Image (cartoon, rainbow, N blue to C red):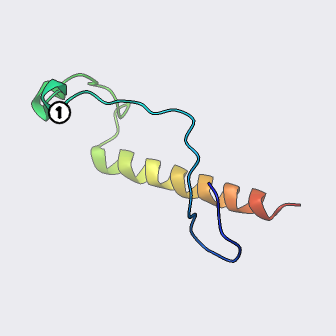
């Protein structure tokens, strides 16, 4: 990404590759996904699983923030 001096957001993006996605009609419907990953939460309720994942994302963001400030 390319930033103008003193700008918060990029004004240009350099693209190396473009991935073409299938047509929407070729994608699975939500009902097609039911039962595909029966133990995806490893026994946790959906609430517990979501809480755990959010916590991991938060900790990862803190680590990245610390690394950015590290000389």
- Residue situated in front as seen by the camera: 11 or 27: 11
Quadrant location of the N terminus in the rendered image: bottom right
Q: Measuring from the top left, give residue 18's x and y in whole percent.
A: 45, 33
Q: Quadrant of residue 6?
A: bottom right
- Residue situated in front as seen by the camera: 17 or 55: 17
Q: Give the class, few, some or many, for how many residues have Cα within 10 Å of label 1's Cα (few <14, many ≥20).
A: few
- Residue situated in front as seen by the camera: 8 or 66: 8
Q: Is residue 18 above or below residue 32?
A: below
Residue at the image point whose x is 45% and y is 48% from the top: 53
- Residue situated in front as seen by the camera: 30 or 10: 10
Q: Is residue 16 left or right of residue 39?
A: right
Quadrant location of the C terminus in the rendered image: bottom right
Q: Measuring from the top left, give residue 35's x and y in whole percent.
A: 19, 24
Residue at the image point whose x is 65% and y is 64% from the top: 3
Q: How many marks?
A: 1
Q: Is residue 37 left or right of residue 59?
A: left
Q: Which residue is mark 1?
A: 24
Q: Quadrant of residue 33?
A: top left
Q: Is residue 39 left or right of residue 23?
A: right
Q: Quadrant of residue 62?
A: bottom right
Q: Is residue 57 above or below residue 23?
A: below
Element under disc 1: helix
Residue at the image point whose x is 35% and y is 35% from the top: 41
Q: Measuring from the top left, give residue 13's x and y in whole percent.
A: 56, 52
Name, please, the residue furthest toward the bottom. Answer: 6
Residue at the image point whose x is 59% and y is 46% from the top: 14
């Amino acid at each position: 990404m390319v930033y103008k001096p003193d700008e918060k957001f990029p004004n240009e993006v350099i693209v190396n590759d473009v991935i073409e996605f299938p047509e929407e009609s070729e994608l699975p419907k939500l009902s097609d996904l039911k039962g595909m990953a029966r133990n995806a939460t490893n026994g946790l309720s959906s609430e517990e699983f979501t809480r755990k994942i959010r916590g991991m994302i938060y900790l990862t963001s803190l680590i990245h923030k610390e690394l950015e400030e590290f000389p």
